[in-house]
Amino acid sequence: MKRLVCLLMIGMFMICGCAQKVEEKKAVCRITNEGISDEMTIEAQNDTVMTSKSVMKLPFSLYGLTTDDEKAQFAEQMMAEFTEVDGIKITSESTNDEFILTLEVDYSVVAFESLLQLGMMSESDMDVEIISFEKTVEGLKTSGYTCE
């Protein structure tokens, strides 16, 4: 009887997909363009992106910012859009020469509509149920990023 119950449970797990192996994936993609650099780390399970972390470095000289007030106002404007979105954590720091913006996204929490409004997702992607790891990495490479 025990053996029959075990076989039934194994069969149920296989049917439900509960026994499916989860493959952890990670890519680190980098780009430097017109003085702005970005390093994006993407973590996924199978082909589903779970989180991303982007660290952008923006030189103040690129924007003609020289005074502390100008730099502070720039930092405030850059962060304002992202501060009230569930699933997005944003932090920043400034040096004398650059503004460093760190943007972390938890895709299990953030609403796709929020990503669309922020320009982080296109209208054509709204029909999907997941953010594809493979398509994301491919899109970054097409945009000039190098990924490892």
Image (cartoon, rainbow, N blue to C red):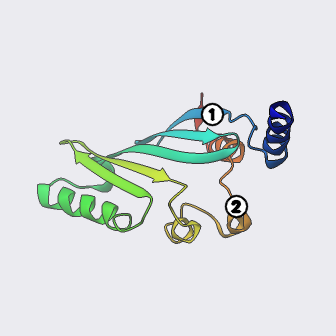
The quarter of the rendered structure image containing the N terminus is top right
Q: Specify whether residue 60 is in view.
A: no
- Vertical position of residue 95 compared to residue 80: above or below: above
Q: Specify whether residue 25 is in view.
A: yes
Image position, residue 83 (x, y; %) = 33, 64
Give SS at disc 1.
strand
Does 128 sit left or right of 103 as displayed? right
Give SS at disc 2.
loop
Please name the residue that numbered disc 1 is placed on.
25
Q: In the depicted view, which residue is nearer to us: 52 or 30?
A: 52
Q: Please name the residue shown 67% across and 56% down the image.
A: 130
Q: Tell which circle, 1 or 2, labels the residue nearer the N-terminal end.
A: 1
Image position, residue 107 (x, y; %) = 54, 55
Q: Please name the residue shown 69% across and 63% down the image.
A: 125
Please name the residue that numbered disc 2 is placed on.
129
- Quarter of the image for residue 112 reads bottom right
Does 78 sit left or right of 28 as displayed? left
Q: Name the kind of residue labelled 1 in the image.
A: Lys
Q: Please name the residue shown 82% across and 45% down the image.
A: 12
Q: Which mark is residue 123?
A: none
